[in-house]
Amino acid sequence: MPYWIGKVVASGKASSQPPWATTGLEILGTSDFKDGRLNRPGLYAVCYGAEWCPVTRRFMPRFTALSGQLPATLAIADITDLNSPLWDVFRIRITPSIIVFRDGEVIRRVDGKRFLGITRARLSVLKQTFSPALTGSQS
């Protein structure tokens, strides 16, 4: 079960716009996944986030800033609905969490820490995922 702390942003006010609305990143839903796989070829770093999560809201600019720094397509899996099957399929317990897929298969995940989200140290672990050995790239 995810840790739900309400639909409140850091300012304490409810928001009607998801934190990824203006990122320009692809927004993924339940139909983009099947049997624990992403229905996309190539390398994807997918951030699982919820609109009501203040930690996700704070993290979104840092995740978006990774665009162009990683040899992967960045995308957002919207799990705002607590009844979304993606919570259980990918065993998401904290938002944000990032799962990296290569040709639909999970190759790495970086989970946020309660109340902290994904720290700089955890982002470093994510960046190490993109070594040629893990991505299948040739040098």
Image (spheres, rainbow, N blue to C red):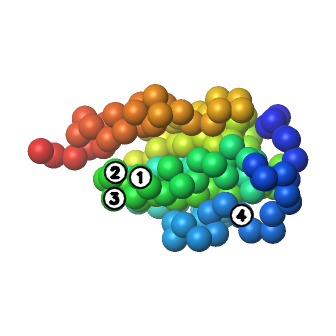
Query: Dots 1 and 2: beta carbons under 8 Å?
Result: yes
Residue at horizontal 52 percent and vertical 71 percent from the top: 24
- Residue assigned mark 4: 18
Secondary structure category for the residue under label 3: loop
Q: Quadrant of residue 61?
A: bottom right
Task: Tell me which residue sits at (47%, 34%) in the image.
Answer: 120
Residue 121, numbered label: none
- Residue type, label 2: Leu
Instruction: Give the residue displayed 50% in from the left and 51% down from the top.
Output: 63
Q: Secondary structure at mark 1?
A: loop
Look at label 3 and name its amino acid.
Answer: Gly
Residue 16, by quadrant, is bottom right
Front position in the image: 102 or 13: 13
Tag 3 or tag 4, which sits nearer the N-term?
4
Residue 5 at x, y percent in the picture: 85, 41
Alpha-carbon span between mark 1 and mark 2: 6 Å
Identify residue for label 1.
66
Quadrant housing residue 124: top left
Element under label 4? loop
Q: Position of residue 135 (x, y in %)?
A: 30, 43
- Whether tag 3 and tag 2 are in contact, CB under 8 A, the answer is yes
Residue on which the image places disc 2: 70
